[in-house]
């Protein structure tokens, strides 16, 4: 099992090719499955400033399927951005899609077909600076924005087993331009990244100036405590 943290704090890259996003802070390599999607590092964030309007994804193999995937929405100009979980390829994944200033959408995508989960996302319009997440466990999934979760969704009968066990998680962007994603993480729900190690019980939160220590709830497999 590997947990992932990537703040994208590295040199800007040409937004072409499979290696354009480089390697996460925790050592895992990013995969951009289609070079034409033009992912890259832009001012310490992940983006597609010159990419086409397409359902573009990029992922890291975290080695674990039951995870909490999170990122922070950044940029300007609106459009659709978000995160994916449990990808097997570019046509199969779970998606949290955020339309800035409008609404949040949740989908399963299997065999290239999007199936909406209309009751899944938390209510309200997403904004730049929001922290969003997908929490997966077995045949269930839930979605959060700024720590507020929507109802748990049961995926029984929908995804094939291979998709339930998929360990690739990452970024999504339908529109390019000025949209960005930052502070991407994948972790087992009971562990949080602190400094140079994954620890249970506590995390460090960025208050805009310094890292401060704060208590976090622990997921026991069924409930947050």
Image: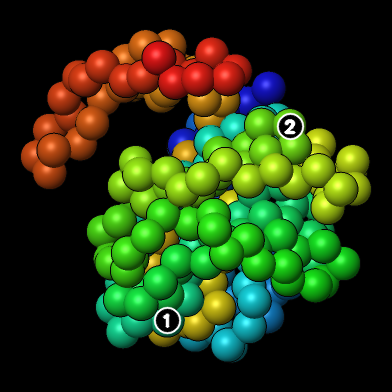
Quadrant assignment for the C terminus: top left
The colour scheme used to paint the residues is: rainbow
Residue 30 is left or right of residue 145, and the answer is: right
Please name whichever residue, 205 or 224, is drawn nearer the observer in this view of the structure.
Answer: 224
Residue 47 is left or right of residue 161, and the answer is: left
Residue 179 screen position, x and y as percent = 38, 74
Q: Which mark is residue 137?
A: none
Q: In the figure, 63 relative to 45: above or below? A: above
- Residue depicted at x 44% and y 21%: 224
Residue 59 screen position, x and y as percent = 64, 53
Q: What crowding class fits label 2: few (fewer than 14 Cα within 10 Å), some (14-19), or many (20 or more)?
A: some
Describe the element under mark 1 as helix, strand or loop: loop
Describe the element under mark 2 as helix, strand or loop: loop
Residue 95 appearing in the image: yes
- Residue depicted at x 50% and y 82%: 175
Counting residues from the N terminus, which is met first, the one under dot 2 or under dot 1?
1
Q: How many marks?
A: 2
Residue 107 screen position, x and y as percent = 65, 63
Residue 10 appearing in the image: no
Q: What crowding class fits label 1: few (fewer than 14 Cα within 10 Å), some (14-19), or many (20 or more)?
A: some
Quadrant assignment for the N terminus: top right
Q: CA distance from mark 2 to mark 1?
A: 31 Å
Q: Which residue is mark 1?
A: 79
Q: Nearer the viewer, mark 2 or mark 1?
A: 2
Q: Which mark is residue 138?
A: 2
- Residue depicted at x 20% and y 19%: 213
Q: On the image, which quarter does residue 138 sit in? A: top right
Please name whichever residue, 182 or 12, is drawn nearer the observer in this view of the structure.
Answer: 182
Residue 89 screen position, x and y as percent = 81, 59
Q: In the figure, 211 relative to 106: above or below? A: above
Please name whichever residue, 198 or 73, is drawn nearer the observer in this view of the structure.
Answer: 73
């Amino acid at each position: 099992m590997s947990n992932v943290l990537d703040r994208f704090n590295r040199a800007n890259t040409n937004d072409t090719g499979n290696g354009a996003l480089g390697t996460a802070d925790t050592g895992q390599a990013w995969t951009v499955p289609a070079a034409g999607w033009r992912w890259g590092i832009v001012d310490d964030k992940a983006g597609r400033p010159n990419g086409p309007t397409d359902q573009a994804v990029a992922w890291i193999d975290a080695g674990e399927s039951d995870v909490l995937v999170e990122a922070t929405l950044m940029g300007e100009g609106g459009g659709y951005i978000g995160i994916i979980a449990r990808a097997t390829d570019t046509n199969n994944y779970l998606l949290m899609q955020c339309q800035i200033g409008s609404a949040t959408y949740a989908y399963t995508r299997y065999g290239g077909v999007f199936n909406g989960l209309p009751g899944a996302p938390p209510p309200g319009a997403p904004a730049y600076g929001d922290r969003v997440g997908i929490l997966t466990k077995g045949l269930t999934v839930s979605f959060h924005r700024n720590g507020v979760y929507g109802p748990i969704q049961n995926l029984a009968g929908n995804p094939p087993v291979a998709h339930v066990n998929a360990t690739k998680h990452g970024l999504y962007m339908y529109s390019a331009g000025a949209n960005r994603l930052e502070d991407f993480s994948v972790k087992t729900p009971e562990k949080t990244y602190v400094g140079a190690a994954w620890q249970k019980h506590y995390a460090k939160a960025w208050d805009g100036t310094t890292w401060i220590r704060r208590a976090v709830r622990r997921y026991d497999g069924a409930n947050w405590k």
